[in-house]
Image (cartoon, grey):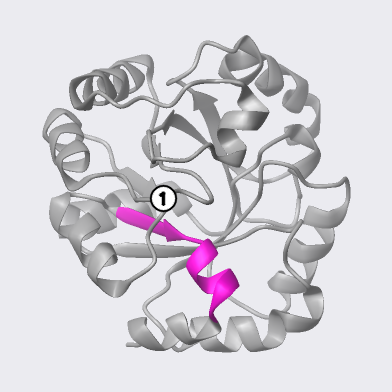
């Protein structure tokens, strides 16, 4: 059994940067999985995240099942809805959208998921999820009907409130299709206030942007679109 949260916390304590590739089941073609995973194994990628804003029922389960046969790296669910829960993954980020005030994504969806999660052995990781202004309307924004945060201080304070509430991780999300990633100043200020690991995702499309996010304080970076659009991006982050 993998211990996903403990490993992330240990990496933070040791100053070891982590990198996850996000696979959106609604966009990914299973026939490409073997090449995709082979390339991922040749890089510094440490985790596979699986999820999307809008995914048809059973699609996530099929992808996770196939992925499980191809990799020993941790598979973590990053769900946009309760229909994306798969008992074959290793863990699930139990996301509460702290940046918005839509009760569905603060607590209601979580209540709906309890009966499903109780039937699995998934490691459930309480995660404060913050949508950050990125210069474009993202899928997360459309689905959740919430407004991204642009104020650096408000982001940091919201993240700290999440830690006070008992969240184990804070996820700063620019969103899929973001024009630009979460700024280094937002990451740095948030880092200075927290004692828990910070995940940063959305809008990172180059090794330079990845390194800037790490330098600013990201403990784990998530990249999705860059890999979806260009498999050669894997070659930029090889061991």
The residue where tag 1 is placed is 179
Q: Position of residue 121 (x, y in %)?
A: 69, 46
Q: Nearer the viewer, residue 12 or 237?
A: 237
Residues shaded magenta: 220-230
Q: Does residue 228 show up magenta in the picture?
A: yes
x, y (%) of residue 96? 52, 25
- Residue 60 location (% of width, % of height): 78, 54
Point 45% across, 89% down: residue: 42
Residue closest to the eye, 122 or 150: 150
* Residue under the point 49% across and 44% down: 175
95 relative position to 151: left or right? right
Residue at point 61% right, 40% down? 139
Front residue of this view, candidates 29 and 93: 29
| 106 in relation to 149, above or below | above
**Residue 115 in magenta?**
no
Instruction: Determine the secondary structure under disc 1.
Output: loop
In this rendering, would 35 be left or right of 133? Answer: right
């Amino acid at each position: 059994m993998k211990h996903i949260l403990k490993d992330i916390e240990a990496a933070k304590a040791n100053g070891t940067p982590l990198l996850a590739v996000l696979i959106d089941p609604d966009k990914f073609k299973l026939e490409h999985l073997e090449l995709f995973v082979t390339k991922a194994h040749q890089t510094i990628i440490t985790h596979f995240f699986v999820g999307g804003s809008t995914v048809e029922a059973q699609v996530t389960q099929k992808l996770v099942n196939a992925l499980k046969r191809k990799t020993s790296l941790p598979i973590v669910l990053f769900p946009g809805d309760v229909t994306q829960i798969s008992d074959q993954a290793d863990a699930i980020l139990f996301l509460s959208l702290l940046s918005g005030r839509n009760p569905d994504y603060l607590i209601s969806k979580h209540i709906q998921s309890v009966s499903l999660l109780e039937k699995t052995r998934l490691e459930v990781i309480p995660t404060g999820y913050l949508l950050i202004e990125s210069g474009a309307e993202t899928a997360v924004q459309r689905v959740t009907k919430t407004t991204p945060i642009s104020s650096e201080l408000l982001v940091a304070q919201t993240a700290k409130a999440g830690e006070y509430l008992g969240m184990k991780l804070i996820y700063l999300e620019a969103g899929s299709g973001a024009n630009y990633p979460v700024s280094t100043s937002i990451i740095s200020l948030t880092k200075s206030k927290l004692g828990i690991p910070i995940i940063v995702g959305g809008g990172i499309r180059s090794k330079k942007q990845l390194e800037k996010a790490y330098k600013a304080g990201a403990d784990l970076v998530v990249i999705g679109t860059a890999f979806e659009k260009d498999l050669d991006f894997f070659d930029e982050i090889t061991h």
